[in-house]
Amino acid sequence: MNGLLGFFAGLLGVSILIALVGIANTVSLSVVERRRELAVQRALGMTRGQLGATLLVEALLMAAVGGLVGTRFGLGYGALLARTTLSEDLVLAVPGWQLLGYVLLAAAAGVLAAVVPARRAARMVLPTGAG
């Protein structure tokens, strides 16, 4: 049983790594696609710090929603699997605080994955004569 739990923990670690790369990639693509919009925001008075903070909040929301949706699906499918394989009279104990901690950890990891793209966007300047 310990070997099986270790295997699933390894799979979870790989999936978290893939999710962090996905968040960084999504924020980077968002910056590239919205280059002119971000330049207009800077021209209208948004500071570099405010622009970077806006992109970090986007990443935070993306990671938090992903963590909540993933937790909800995991709870649902886990309950279905446990009921079908073990017993119909099964009482499930859900570690709520631990799951909340994981969602918060996912949100923090999403923000960390977006730091580099957000800093790059804050330093980006629209070329003169474009538009």
Image (cartoon, rainbow, N blue to C red):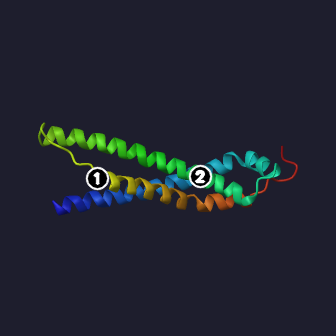
Q: Residue at x 30, y 44 (%)?
A: 75
Is residue 124 rendered to the left or right of residue 20? right
Residue sitting farthest toward the front: 97
Residue 89 at x, y percent in the picture = 12, 38
Q: Amino acid at mark 2?
A: Val
Q: Quadrant of the C terminus?
A: top right
When the figure is inspected, residue 112 is found, relative to residue 89, above or below; the finding is below
**Crowd class of label 2 (few under 14; some 14 to 19; many from 20; radius 10 Å):** some
Q: Amino acid at mark 1?
A: Pro
Is residue 125 rendered to the left or right of residue 53? right
Residue 14 at x, y percent in the picture = 38, 58
Question: What is the quadrant of residue 33 in the picture?
Answer: top right
**Cα–Cα gap, marks 1 and 2:** 27 Å
When the figure is inspected, residue 47 is found, relative to residue 83, above or below; the finding is below
Disc number lying in front (1 or 2):
1
Q: Which residue is mark 1?
A: 95
Q: Which residue is mark 2?
A: 57
What kind of element bears circle 2?
Answer: helix
Q: Residue at x 43, y 49 (%)?
A: 67
Residue 66 at x, y percent in the picture = 45, 46
Question: What is the quadrant of residue 123 in the picture?
Answer: bottom right
Is residue 26 rendered to the left or right of residue 90? right
Residue 6 at x, y percent in the picture = 24, 62
When the figure is inspected, residue 83 is found, relative to residue 59, above or below; the finding is above
